[in-house]
Amino acid sequence: MRRGKISDSNWALIEALESACPCSRTGRFLTMHKRRRKRLTSRSLSQDHPALLDDIHHGSVQCVLDKVWQWPFNAFTLDNVTGGRSLPVLCVHLFHWYGLLDHFNLDVVEVWKLFSLIEEGYHSTNPYHNSIHATDVTQAMHCFLQEEKIREHLTPLEVMAALIAAVAHDLDHPGVNQPFLIATSNHLAALYENTSVLENHHWRSAIGCLLESSVADQLSKDSRKLLDEQISSLILATDITRQQEFLTRFKDSLDKNSLDMKDHENRHFILQIALKCADISNPCRPWDISYKWSQKVCEEFFRQGDYERQLNLPVTSLCDRHSTSIPKIQAGFFRFVVAPLLEEWDRFLCTTLSNKMIKNLRDNQTRWETALQQELAEETRTEISEAEEICDEISDARGSDDESRRSSLPTVVLETVDRLGRRHSVPLSLSHPNAPPPVWGNTLTTGDNLRLRDERSRRFTIGQISNLKEEEEELQLSQMSSCSNQSFQRSSDCGSNDERPVSAENLLPELSIASITTHDEASRLSSVLHGNVSLAPPPSSRSLQRQQTFPPLQPYVRTRYMSTSGEPIAHSTSISSSSSSRTGGSDSDCAGLKRDSTDDSDREKITKFAKICEKENVNPRKDSLDVRRLAIPQNTRRRGSAPVGQLSAELIERLARRGSMPTSDSRQSVLKPLGLKENAGMPRRSSLPFDLHHSATLFTDASNGEDLRHREKGSKKSKKKKLLRRRSSGGPDLLLPREHLLNRRRGSLPSEMFTSQSGNSNNRNLENSRRIVSSRRSLAHPKIQLLPQ
Ligand SMILES: Nc1ncnc2c1ncn2[C@@H]1O[C@@H]2COP(=O)(O)O[C@H]2[C@H]1O
Ligand SMILES: [Zn+2]
């Protein structure tokens, strides 16, 4: 037995590691996923080849740890050399390095156990929010703590809180964002009242680990209390929806030069900012490392988008692999989220480290923006050549004799349409075999990233996290109810198809029929799709109740869909009006046109279609917007996940409220778990939680905001705008002024990043009270003694 090669203390560590947490094998944090445990090399090594573990620790691991104070740190490397144990290895190392073990007289085995528990709490199946991200953020925090301005006044307790908060800040992250949890009625959303749902869960899980590892027992009562408070407040600050709130305060303090670090509150604030910076500091790493993080985070976003698609939920635009791309996400995130904060951080620190971070950020940003430009240029080239081909084919069709043209025309048109529609899934490389290969390596050359998109005019911009899925649905419906493939019209009179071609995807019967309530409707649409019936919708189609009876994939009901077409029954009229405006004209107008269209000659069709080739940006019908606006009742704005079928009138009234900002009567402690009954009666919160900052605009004057605008998808005005934007700029939308982007932003997630929050007042109250309590405490802690490496 080679046990002799391992020191007694290491044996103790290994044994503790193995016996530490039976709970970790039983899904301790109760989130949505049952996690697959990762196979840890160190675990099997400790069983089979313990000596090897020793070697690992004293070889390459040590090598990496020796450089752990340097900014170009690669957490993936540490994770590799530690056999997947980067988190506890780094943290035990840092606890030792900062003298925390000695200062608080902590048992190293308990400390190892603490960090093992935390590591176990991360989902190794998440591409991004896993323990390597925690390691990365902790190392960044470590770098910041070394900065003289910060270090010189920090107490050991503050250092310990900062490190634990960094390492646990995403503990038990499910790999999906808050809106997803809300939309899927996750119990955590109810528990934390849709407010900082994940962050609340993270810090509470962290406290759980402290208790479970017995590290908490080793601290004095006062220290423990202070530690808990600081950890909680630090982790809550990482809620990206509170970015603006923190940024404004930070800027303000810098302007006033009021950040005296001798003051406990200021130090705490700076630690909050430091953790926030660390959390989004991957764009500031050297390119090869930063690039890898970008891939990981986008992979996770796209995976969420895939879940949403599978669940028939609206796909968050940032998460939709078919309508956005990694360069687009990165260019926007770097510019609008990271740069504003990190520039202020640089202003505060103004050191070699902060300068270097900004330099890396700019370099990396330039790379992504260049990639984005290339992507757009390539798309435009392909689009032009496709348009040319279409026009050629139409000219050919014109050339044939009248009789044959009459019979062959629809085929030509359909083939053409089909080709346009297939843009969704045709990789550039296929349509342009001779096109130069994209420069961004494997990930960027995948079909997903290079997919041509017929909704290019709707492409993602960082300030425009709009609910494009909703838009697409409405387009699908309007296309189906107004223009069949039998009389495929692209004229400005029946305008749902003016801007973009009908895609094969849009015509998929399953998709659309899935959104129809009744069997009759389904069969009628099916017939329309197959060109068997005329287009005029029967009057009953006006009371379509989308998604109400279509069985969800999951036990919860997707009322988000309900809201796009209005409340059941009660708003059938509005649905009817909105449906008509979607098609770009009044009811009679469009229906008339549809009926007439069956009498149209093929010649007219060719002419109209050819016109589209020449002039894609058709004249919008502005008046339809107003009709629509007037017709939409307040309640159609409702979002949420409560089963619509069970709503009483009273409840519907209550549900009309959206937004995650707690109502006054519900400002209970965020920590208070809500029982089922309380939950049922709880004022409705939204699935659009991050727009609080703009909620007033959105909800009170929809005519100025996106809330209505995205109901006007059929309107050529909005389409034209988008099309023009795309065509004229030839560049990313993100170059638009920030305010503009923010105003346009809708929808879910990482949009959170762009708005300030007024909705987390309960958290802030909690923090404020903590701050007050904390500020009353004396700063009795001795200055930390930094040990040499
Ligand atoms: N490189 C990146 N690109 C896009 N989003 C990012 C990137 N890095 C971090 N984020 C987002 O910023 C968020 C910060 O908090 P989280 O770590 O919880 O989740 C993170 C991601 O949603
Ligand atoms: Zn994070």
Image (cartoon, rainbow, N blue to C red):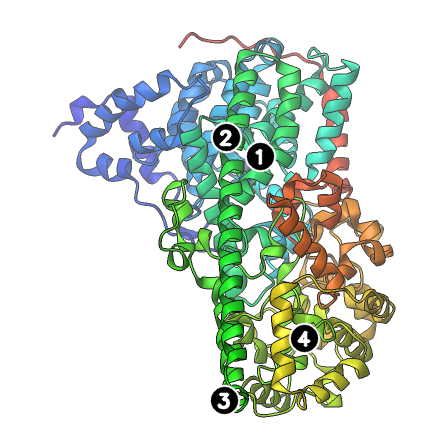
The residues bearing labels 3 and 2 have C-alpha atoms spaced at a distance of: 58 Å
> Residue drawn 72% across and 71% down?
492
Q: What residue does disc 1 label?
A: 334
Q: Do the CB atoms of the residues marked 3 and 2 lie less than 8 Å apart?
A: no
- Residue behind label 4 places its C-beta within 8 angstroms of ligand 1: no
Horizontal and vertical percent for residue 557? 62, 70
* Callout 3: SS: helix
Q: Spatial distance from mark 4 to mark 2, Cα to Cα?
A: 42 Å
User: Does the residue at mark 2 contact the one at mark 1 (Cβ under 8 Å)?
Assistant: yes
Secondary element under disc 1, as helix, strand or loop, is: helix
- Give the number of the mark in front: 3 or 1: 3
**Looking at numbered disc 3 in the image, what kind of residue is underneath it?**
Ser
Position above or below: 122 against 334:
below
Q: Amino acid at mark 2?
A: Asn
Q: Which mark is residue 404?
A: 3
Q: Earlier in the sequence, mark 2 or mark 1?
A: 1
Queried on whether the Cβ of the residue with tag 1 lies below 8 angstroms from ligand 1, the answer reads yes
The answer to which of marks 3 and 2 sits earlier in the sequence is 2
